Amino acid sequence: MAHSHPDIGNWFEMLESGQLFEVVALDDLHRTIEIQYLDGTLDELDMEQWQVLPLAPAPPPEDANIAYGMTAREHSASSSDPGIPEEQNPLDYLEGESFSGTDESL
């Protein structure tokens, strides 16, 4: 089966197994495609393999963050942290460090 060139972030389904995966990296120099399955497993395919795999484009799954150890509900709950008001930037709470030999240490 011929497929168009994969793009990072696109989801596909392997028609034989029904497994969903996301294209996470492309290496044009070595002509390889790195993919990640829903369970977090990484795999690498070369362009020749990609062209003959029975694939179909697929929409991202509802819980696409599961490979990163977070469900969609956990992700949305952590993004609205009640400890920091929305109008403030969390970077405002970081303290800088001074290192000897820099202008800040004078």
Image: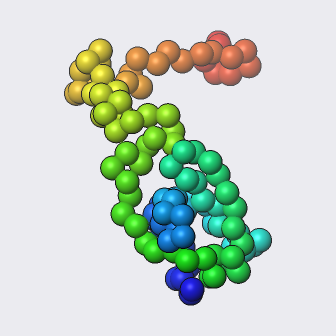
Identify the residue at the far top of this view: 106
Q: Position of residue 6 (x, y in %)?
A: 54, 73
> Which quarter shows the C terminus?
top right
Q: Position of residue 85 (x, y in %)?
A: 24, 21
Figure check: 6 above or below 86: below
Identify the residue at the far front of this view: 16
Q: Using the rendered image of the protein, determine whether residue 81 is visible from the camera's viewpoint.
A: yes
Q: In the figure, is residue 5 to the left or right of 105?
A: left
Q: How many marks?
A: 0
Q: In the figure, is residue 12 to the left or right of 30?
A: left
> Which quarter shows the N terminus?
bottom right
Identify the residue at the far bottom of this view: 2
Figure check: 49 above or below 14: below
At 54% from the left and 83% from the top, the residue drawn is 3
Q: Position of residue 35 (x, y in %)?
A: 60, 59
Identify the residue at the far right of this view: 30
At 51% from the left and 42% from the top, the residue drawn is 67
Work out whether residue 8 or residue 90 is closer to the camera in this orientation and state it: 8
At 64% from the left and 61% from the top, the residue drawn is 34
Q: How is the image coloured?
A: rainbow
Work out whether residue 42 or residue 26 is closer to the camera in this orientation and state it: 42
Work out whether residue 93 or residue 1 is closer to the camera in this orientation and state it: 1
At 54% from the left and 18% from the top, the residue drawn is 96
Work out whether residue 33 or residue 55 is closer to the camera in this orientation and state it: 55
Figure check: 24 above or below 89: below
Dividing the picture into quadrants, the one containing residue 27 is bottom right
Q: Position of residue 61 (x, y in %)?
A: 37, 54
